[in-house]
Image (cartoon, rainbow, N blue to C red):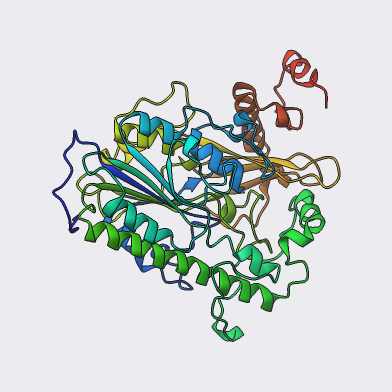
Amino acid sequence: MNDLPGAASVGAGERPNILLIMADQMAAHMMSNTGNPDISTPALDRLAAEGTRMDRAYVTFPLCVPARSSLLTGQYPHTLGLTSNDASGDALGPDSLGHLLSGGGYQCAYAGKWHATRPSAQAGDGFEPIKDFGDRGLTTAVDQFLTSGRDPNCPFFLVASFDDPHTICEYARNQPLYYGDTPTTELANTPNLPANFGHQPFEPEALRTEQHEHAKVYGTGGYTPEDWRHYRYTYARLVERVDARVGELLEILDRTGRARDTLVIFTSDHGDGDGSHSWNQKTALFEEIVRVPFLVRWPGRVPAGRVDSGTLVSVCLDLLPTLAQAAQARATAGLPGRSLLPVLCDGERLDRERLVVQTSFPAVTAPATRGRAVVEHRYKYVLYSWGRYREQLHDLQSDPGEMTNLAVESRYQGELDRLRGELLRWARSGGDEEMLTRLVLPQDTDEVAREEIYVRPY
């Protein structure tokens, strides 16, 4: 099943080499192996065919710095105090991923975009920086590291972090693309608009206010349907550019004989609206933005060709304990994430009924817009901190495009109230002080609890 060139299959007790490949702002649906007819991703298709694709993988926060800091520490962004891209400094600490694995005997190297919080990694982050921010020359740096820049007797943990397709932001603002232009085409050759394009009834007032106030950032305020189709075409080409570089990395592993003893993971820090709900970029809590690719290849350990559409994966929380277990390193106790190796290698069921995603928009005028989403196997509850229709309830099984807000229907009030309670329990147990006083409390909340919540200043 895992017919890959290179060294003999890794044994159950051996520690693998690890290659973590990251794209920036890549949505989960942007791979041809998911059935998307508007894109061709042969390298990612190969990874999926030779490993396992997990289809319900979510980030903790759909924004670069909070998501990447969360991924490197296994902590929620609000715990780290990093809830915007304006954060600065070295807040990740000695228990972050690079320090954890280097302390466990791995040679750790980082190539490309860091953005947690600086653009590029530094030696104090636990990695040897082998390539600064930027996609040009990244695969060459990886090749040099694997062929001449490392101790062959030491397992490696290598991160290859691409900036694309984040440059779709520059495209929308009519700015130069950092790594070269993409092809242009006639309208008839562009992807059609998604079924959930446009403004759905009973959508959150806060989102359109933010879109208007940050018009210079989004760049799509005057877009016509034709513009949106060209946007989607360009986004697909940028993803394909990343895919080509992923193919180069896989070829390097093949050529250097490391394919069979290397655990390869591909993911992203967040997605992109891609025209769904007439939204581009990130920060909102739509599925296209908070759900990302998660492909895992480990020959001889992770089954090939499997698609897991049931397990709820919190990428930023689960990656650190997963890699720690694979590397036989000891992670900090009490982290909120889970190792995915029992699911990936042994087909066990992950005992997780729900996960939470956070967000916060930069404040142009007070109050700042914050949001939380509770994602379950069927239902998704979204709450923004202010505005009309700030509560959203969607049945993801019958309405994966989040087009019908069930929160406005009386027959779903029981489900709505239950999920209010789940979010309240999560916020109180996890110390989410920032959002606690903005929650819609469930009907059975007692007066003692209300007093404890609202004693906080607003």
Left or right, 68 with reference to 104: right
| Coordinates of residue 366 in the picture (x, y in percent) | 85, 41
Please say if 323 is above or below 3: above
Q: Quadrant for the C terminus, please.
A: top right
Place residue 127 in its image quadrant.
Answer: top left
Relative horizontal placement of residue 33, taking residue 153 as reference (left or right): right
Viewer can see residue 152: yes
Looking at the image, which is closer to me, 187 or 453? 187
Q: Position of residue 109 (x, y in %)?
A: 39, 44
Q: Is residue 84 above or below residue 429?
A: below
- Image position of 406 (left or right of 232): right
Q: Residue at x 44, y 23 (%)?
A: 332
- Residue 387, x across and y down, in percent: 81, 44
* Number of numbered discs on residues: 0
Q: Quadrant of residue 372?
A: top right
Residue at the extreme front: 148
Q: Is residue 184 above or below residue 407?
A: below
> Does residue 314 appear left or right of residue 431 in this picture?
left
Where on the picture, by quarter, is residue 232?
Answer: bottom right
Visible residue check, residue 196:
no
Instruction: Name the image quarter holding the N terminus.
Output: bottom left
Q: Residue 19, image x and y in percent?
A: 35, 48
Which residue is most to the top?
448
Determine the residue located farthest toward the left in the rendered image. 8
Name the residue nearer the viewer: 255 or 68. Answer: 255
